[in-house]
Amino acid sequence: MSIGAIKGVEIGAGFNAAAMTGFENNDFYKDEDGHVNKATNHAGGMTGGISDGSEITIRAAVKPTPSIHLEQKLRIVVASLLTSSLAGVMTPLLSHVRSLLLKI
């Protein structure tokens, strides 16, 4: 994906579907007061990329920021071992990106 810090995206059961059988992952329908509704939503509200009228469920995994205010060891070239630390705020907008993605 082209959104920085996003490492994984899943829709519905997502990666957990890999551990399910086909029968477990199927979405079943029920009749409620003359309306057909889904009893489960493993597909995340989409069938074939089109909304099926159910709640759309999308989750994104966001990596933590690598810029932290703790001293870290660096290896430059092969023989040199240095330490590095940061000063100031080095995480521009990462928390804002997370909150925006979760609101969509």
Image (cartoon, rainbow, N blue to C red):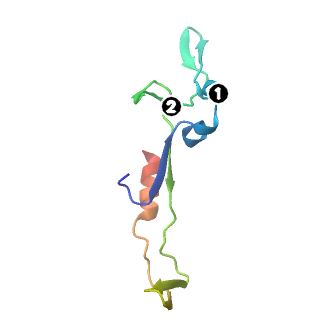
> Would you name the residue on which mark 2 appears?
55
Three-letter code, disc 1: Glu
Q: How many marks?
A: 2
Say if 24 sits above or below 11 in the image.
Answer: above
Three-letter code, disc 2: Glu
Residue 58 percent across, percent down from the top left? 49, 41
Q: In this view, which residue lies farthest toward the top?
A: 34
> Would you name the residue on which mark 1 appears?
24
Query: What is the CA distance from the residue labelled 2 to the residue labelled 1?
Result: 19 Å
Q: In this view, which residue lies farthest toward the front?
A: 78
- Helix, strand or loop at mark 2: loop
Q: Nearer the viewer, residue 33 or 20?
A: 20
Residue 93 percent across, percent down from the top left? 40, 65
Residue 66 percent across, percent down from the top left? 49, 71
Say if 34 sits above or below 81 in the image.
Answer: above
Say if 80 sits above or below 21 in the image.
Answer: below
